[in-house]
Image (spheres, rainbow, N blue to C red):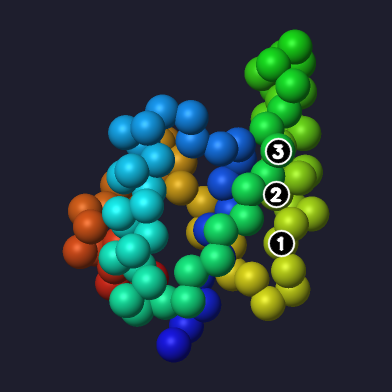
Amino acid sequence: MKNLRIIVVGRLRVPHWRDAAKEYAGRLARMYRVEESVIKDGDASLTPAERAALESSRIMAALRPQDSPVLLDERGRSMDSRAFAVFL
């Protein structure tokens, strides 16, 4: 069974999104050993650029040599669920 490590910035605070994340983690657990790493989000008093830089550096520090990072971004390539499953 392959490992899947999910690195997230900050904790989900909205119950609906926490429930959705739990549902998808359960689905993934059928095919992968799932590990979640939570990175502390940047201070809200920082500018958006400073905050992004801080959070980026925290993510990079959390990566291990054996990790193959995949970034999920709303400006990235769109995939439906099946295409993303094939990609993984």
Whole-angstrom CA distance, mark 3 to mark 2, is 9 Å
In this image, 1 relative to 38: left or right? left
Relative to 30, residue 69 above or below: above
Secondary structure category for the residue under label 3? loop
**Considering depth in this image, is 46 or 32 the residue closer to the camera?**
32
Relative to 25, residue 44 above or below: above
The amino acid type found where label 2 is placed reads: Ile
Secondary structure category for the residue under label 1? loop
Mark number, residue 63: 1
Instruction: Give the quadrant of residue 44.
Output: top right
Q: Position of residue 22 (x, y in %)?
A: 37, 52
Secondary structure category for the residue under label 2? helix
The amino acid type found where label 3 is placed reads: Lys
In this image, 46 relative to 7: left or right? right
Residue at x 21% of width, y 53% of height: 80
Mark number, residue 59: 2
Precedes in sequence: disc 1 or disc 3: 3
Instruction: Give the quadrant of residue 53.
Output: top right
In this image, 11 relative to 88: left or right? right
The extreme bottom residue here reads 1
The amino acid type found where label 1 is placed reads: Leu
Q: Position of residue 70 (x, y in %)?
A: 51, 59
Q: Which residue is mark 3?
A: 40
**Considering depth in this image, is 71 or 64 the residue closer to the camera?**
64
Whole-angstrom CA distance, mark 2 to mark 1, is 7 Å
Residue at x 70% of width, y 49% of height: 59
Precedes in sequence: disc 3 or disc 2: 3
Residue at x 20% of width, y 64% of height: 82
Query: Total of numbered circles in the picture?
Result: 3
Label 3 CA crowd tier, 10 Å (few <14, some 14–19, many 20+):
some
Mark number, residue 4: none
Whole-angstrom CA distance, mark 1 to mark 3, is 14 Å
